[in-house]
Amino acid sequence: MQVFRGIPAAAADHVALTIGNFDGVHKGHQAMLSRLTEAAADLDLSPTVLTFEPHPREFFARDTAPARLSTLRDKLESFAAFGVARVCIARFDAALAGLAAERFVDEVLLRGLGTRWVLVGTDFRFGRGRAGDLALLRASARSFSVEAMPTVNVDGERASSSAIRGALARGDLARATRALGRPYAISGHVVHGDKRGRGLGFPTANLCLRHKPALSGIFAVQVRGLGDAPRAGVASLGVRPTIRPDAQPLLEVFVFDFDQSIYGRCIRVEFLHKLRDEERYADLDTLKRAIHTDVAQARDYFATQR
């Protein structure tokens, strides 16, 4: 899969295109990607995704923007798995935000990407002030065809990134899993921490978070990237109020029956079951007893899944 940063000045050839942020690449997104590759094969075009970095809502209101469900790397891996041939990552900045809808069609879709077929959601908006919609796109489509993607429902609700964020915030991991088609996960490289977990008898693999997480608490998890099969564990995701209440969010994972140095390794932590919310304890001894309880409850959870 080819990945391009920015909009090309001129298209090298013609493409079948879909456009969106694809945060989480949930079942609705997956249906769009499947339809994209199907149409591209029928039309002998290159299946291409146009996405944005940062998320437009982060550009307009960074402090109140929603939590991200996936990293850019995770999205790219999902695109490749669905057979996407090219991804164009457009930097969402003032210039792009101020581009009139008609100019977006002419300069981005036609001149820059060579679009001949495009798939969007029925609620698609584009251009300055979100003035462009599906009707305007179709009216502007003199040299390409436009298809609208039907709504995909999960549990009687439209599959959407916002609905998944709501489920994660409530600790309803089962609902989030059904909407995503897989367990919610966070991936990243293992970094050095303050070794506090090892001192308490529970050495952890630590992942720094570049963006605020969509959930917090203590969870039963499985970890991929440490061998052929996933490994069970328990994870703390949050600010560690007993240790450093002013700290940035951190993901700490205690992997059961595992004691290897994995600094720098890229792992994927899948959240399967929420045990409890974060809690601030009076001292480290009380925290250590709570961790013992968390580990026992997580082991009990995995025992029931066999």
Image (cartoon, rainbow, N blue to C red):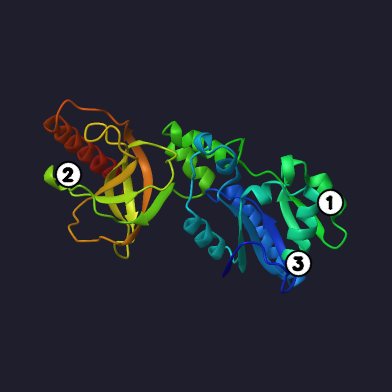
How many other residues sit within 10 Å of disc 2, few (<14), some (14-19) or many (≥20)?
few
User: Does the residue at mark 3 contact the one at mark 2 (Cβ under 8 Å)?
Assistant: no
Pointer 1 residue = 138
Q: Which mark is residue 196?
A: 2
Q: Mark 1 belongs to which amino acid? A: Arg
In the image, residue 277 sits, relative to residue 299, either above or below, namely: above
User: Does the residue at mark 2 contact the one at mark 1 (Cβ under 8 Å)?
Assistant: no
In the image, residue 256 sits, relative to residue 157, either above or below, namely: below
Please give the name of the residue rendered at 19% of the width and 33% of the height, measured from the top-left corner.
290
Q: How many marks?
A: 3
x, y percent for residue 123? 72, 41
Q: Mark 2 belongs to which amino acid? A: Arg
Q: Mark 3 belongs to which amino acid? A: Gly
Please give the name of the residue rendered at 78% of the width and 55% of the height, measured from the top-left corner.
105
Q: Callout 1: helix, strand or loop?
A: helix
Res 187 quadrant in image: bottom left
* Label 2, label 1: how far apart the Cα atoms are: 58 Å
Pointer 3 residue = 114
Give the left or right position of residue 272, taking residue 194 as reference: right
Q: Callout 2: helix, strand or loop?
A: helix
Q: Is residue 122 visible?
A: no
* Label 3, label 1: how far apart the Cα atoms are: 16 Å
Please give the name of the residue rendered at 44% of the width and 45% of the height, measured from the top-left corner.
211
